[in-house]
Image: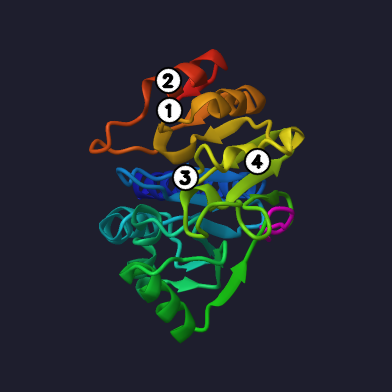
Amino acid sequence: AWRARTVRMAWLAGLAIWIWNAIALRALEARWLRVDVLDVGHGDSILVRTPSRHTLLVDAGSPAAGRFQVMSFLRYAGITTLDGLIVTHPDEDHVGGAVPLLRAIQVRRLVTNGSLGDTSSARQVHVLAAAQGVEEVVVRAGMVVDGGRGVAIEVLHPPPGFVPGTSPESNDNSIVLKLTKGEVSVLLTGDLEEAGLPWLLRVPDRLRATVLKVPHHGSRLGDVGDAFFDVVRPEVAVLSVGRVHHLPAAETLEAISRTGARLV
C-alpha cells in the first residue's frame, strides 16, 4: 500500500510539474512574435503568430504545397482559424495553396494588393472567399495590418496605383510587410524585383530589419539589389527556394554575404 501511495504521489507531482510547465510556456508564448517560414519548395508561405494570438498566413505556396505542407503544419500547430490570409501577389507558388486552405479552415480576412490575377487559382480564391463571407481587404504602402497589441505590421509596398509601367499582378507589385516587436523586426518582401525595389528604397529609414525574407527566391536583382541589401543589413536572411529554377543567383548570395547576415 505504501509503495502504491508513493507511485501515485510521484505521478501526481509529475503531472503538476507538466501542467505548470505548460502554463509557463503559454505565458511566455503570449509575449512572443513567432514567424515560421514553411518549407514549400519553390514558393512562399510564412505563418505569423503575434503576442495577442493573432494568426496570419503570408502566402500559401502552390496548390500541392498548400494541401500537404501548409495544412499539415497548421494542424500540427493546432490552428483552425486564420485571422488573416495575405496573398502578396497572384503567382501560383504564392496563391495556389490558398484554394485548399480556404476549403479546410476558417479565414477571417483575405488581404491582397487588389489584383489576384486571372488564373484558375486566383478565380477560385475569390469565389471561395465570397462564398464563405471572408472580408477582403486591399492594402497599399502606408497602411497597417491588424495584428493586435504587442506588434506593429506596416505595409511598405506597393505604392498607390501600383509601380508605374508594370502590370498590377506583376512581382514588382508584391505586398511588402514589416513586422516589429520591440527591437526585433522582420521584413517580408514577396517576389519584389528590380522595377519595384527603387520604390521601396524611397523609405530607407523603414527598411532596416533583424530578419529579411529575401525577395523573389534569391533571383538576380542587379545594382538596386546591392543597394537594398546594404540598407536592410539583416542579421538573418531567409531564402525560400526550390530546385527547379536555378536559384538563388550567385551575385545575390554575394550581396547578402557582404552584409554579414546569416543565411538560412
- Kindly state the secondary structure of the residue where label 1 is placed: loop
Q: Which quarter of the rendering shows the C terminus?
A: top left
Residue 12 visible? The answer is no
Would you say residue 64 is visible in this rendering?
yes
What residue sits 37% from the left and 45% below the top?
7
Q: Earlier in the sequence, mark 2 or mark 4?
A: 4
Q: Secondary structure at mark 4?
A: helix
Outermost residue toward the left? 244
**SS at mark 3 in the image:** loop
What separation in Å lies between label 4 and label 3 (alpha carbons)?
13 Å
Amino acid at dot 1:
Val
Choose between 32 and 37: the one closer to the eye: 37
Q: Say which residue appears at 49% left-offset and 38% top-offset.
A: 215
Q: Above or below — where is 59 with respect to 222?
A: below
Circle number at residue 161: none
Q: CA distance from mark 4 to mark 1?
A: 23 Å
Q: Left or right of 30: which side holds 40?
A: left
State yes or no: residue 157 in magenta: no
Query: Where residue 29 sits in the image (x, y, percent)?
Result: 60, 47
Which residue is disc 4 drawn over? Answer: 200
Of residue 250 and residue 106, the one placed in the foreground of this image is 250
Which of the two discs, 4 and 1, labels the residue nearer the N terminus?
4
Q: Nearer the viewer, mark 4 or mark 1?
A: 4
Distance between the alpha carbons at the discs numbered 2 and 1: 17 Å
Q: Which residue is mark 2?
A: 251
Give amino acid for label 4: Leu
Which numbered circle lies on residue 264? 1
Magenta residues, as a range?
141-148
Q: Main secondary structure of the magenta part?
A: loop
**Mark closest to the chain's N terminus, 2 or 3:** 3
**Secondary element type, mark 2:** helix
Say whether disc 2 or disc 1 marks the residue closer to the N-terminus.
2
